[in-house]
Amino acid sequence: MLIEDQVLRNNWVVACKATDLKEEPKQVIILGERVVLFRNEEGTHAFKDLCIHRGAALSLGCVKDGQLVCPYHGWEYNSDGKCTNIPQLPEGRAIPLKAQAITYLCKKEYGFIWVNLNNNNPRMIDYSPFYDENYRNVLWGKIEVNANPPRVIENFLDVGHLAFVHEGFLGVSEKPVIGDYNVHEEEFRIYSDEIAIFQPDPDGSGVAKDVYYTYEILSPLSVLFTKRDPDTDNRMTIILIVQPVAEGKSIAHGILSFNYDTGTTDQEIIEFQDMIFAQDKPIVENQKPEDLPLDLQVELSLKSDRMSIAFRQYLKRLGVTLGTA
Ligand code: FES
Ligand code: CO
């Protein structure tokens, strides 16, 4: 996963739901790296989860008076990662300048905490329904998946599987054909035309009909689709945001956004999405090779896989930009 690792380290990577970070520091694993998140009056912070003194995990410590305190010998670190107290030092002895935690850029956005491991402060994705008052937003996840992120992402962009994996829910097996569609590229988004998908009961009225899906890539780890009902113009957007944990391990997070009254509770919406995702999970966890082939000659694509192809081309370009592909 070498190419992708560097691409992802240059991005904002989701670390956890903001409400999952409480008073205690929290360990998250991103790209195989242990990261500690903690909160104080100055905001939310991310450090490498490693004390410079004897390598203890800072996440086992606590936050006291705004300082992150190591559990082993009580060294204290401020928001900038600078060590501000070493209890073992005799009176008047200066704290060594090297006593400093490794810090990562960290921000709160869209109800999640994000970390940028390479500290290059990239552009944050633009997910407009979250701040649109016409939309109801429901946070979904986290779901652990034993697969690398690109396979998880590509499954979400895959139109052809709806009538099979989600038969009876998101498609019907008698109508598997996907019409031709194009993919368009702008500076910060890659998106498809509307694609007609025949669904058994898209609006809960019991009537089967075509609805329209538009897929969109926002970043290597964030993709979305919008489902539009042609009769009512009701729209539902789901953004999938994948946390790359380690080789073969991902965590899926998401936001479901509705511009209409679904007549269901948040919990019901989450449970439905859990059920749909549970149908995808065994497929994605057993795909070979584990890494998405970026060479388009490997695996056989159809025209209807145009969105997946665009994703592979996009990942390849990002790798090339870094000079690692
Ligand atoms: Fe952290 Fe000693 S290992 S204070
Ligand atoms: Co699916």
Image (cartoon, grey):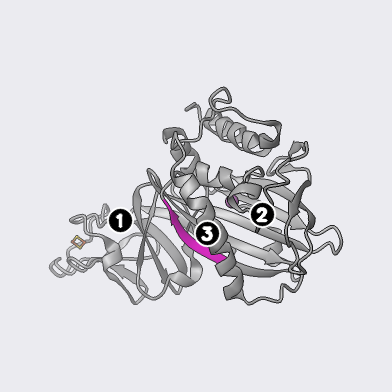
Residue 67 or residue 145, whichever sits in front: 145
Query: In the rendered image, which quarter contains the N terminus?
Result: top left
Image depth: mark 2 or mark 3 in front:
3
Residue under label 2: 126
Residue 193 or residue 79, whichever sits in front: 193
Give the side of residue 81 with respect to residue 190, left or right.
left
Image depth: mark 3 or mark 1 in front:
3
* Residue 143 belongs to magenta span: yes
Q: Earlier in the sequence, mark 3 or mark 1?
A: 1
Give the side of residue 52 with respect to residue 274, left or right.
left
Residue that appears at 53% across and 51% down: 280
Secondary structure under the numbered disc 1 in the rendered image = loop
Which mark is drawn over residue 253?
Answer: 3
Q: Residue furthest right?
A: 231
CB-based contact (under 8 Å), mark 1 and mark 2: no
Q: Amino acid at mark 3?
A: His
Residue that appears at 53% across and 49% down: 121
For the magenta stretch, what is the residue range? 139-145
Residue under label 1: 100
Residue 266: % across, % down: 61, 74
Residue 141 or residue 188, whichever sits in front: 141
CB-based contact (under 8 Å), mark 2 and mark 3: no
Q: Amino acid at mark 2?
A: Asp
Q: Is the magenta region chiefly helix, strand or loop? A: strand
Residue 66 picture quarter: bottom left
Secondary structure under the numbered disc 3 in the rendered image = strand
Image depth: mark 1 or mark 2 in front:
2
Secondary structure under the numbered disc 2 in the rendered image = loop
Q: Would residue 109 be seen by someone viewing this image from the given angle?
A: no
Q: Is mark 3 within 8 Å of ligand 2?
A: no
Q: Is mark 1 within 8 Å of ligand 1?
A: no
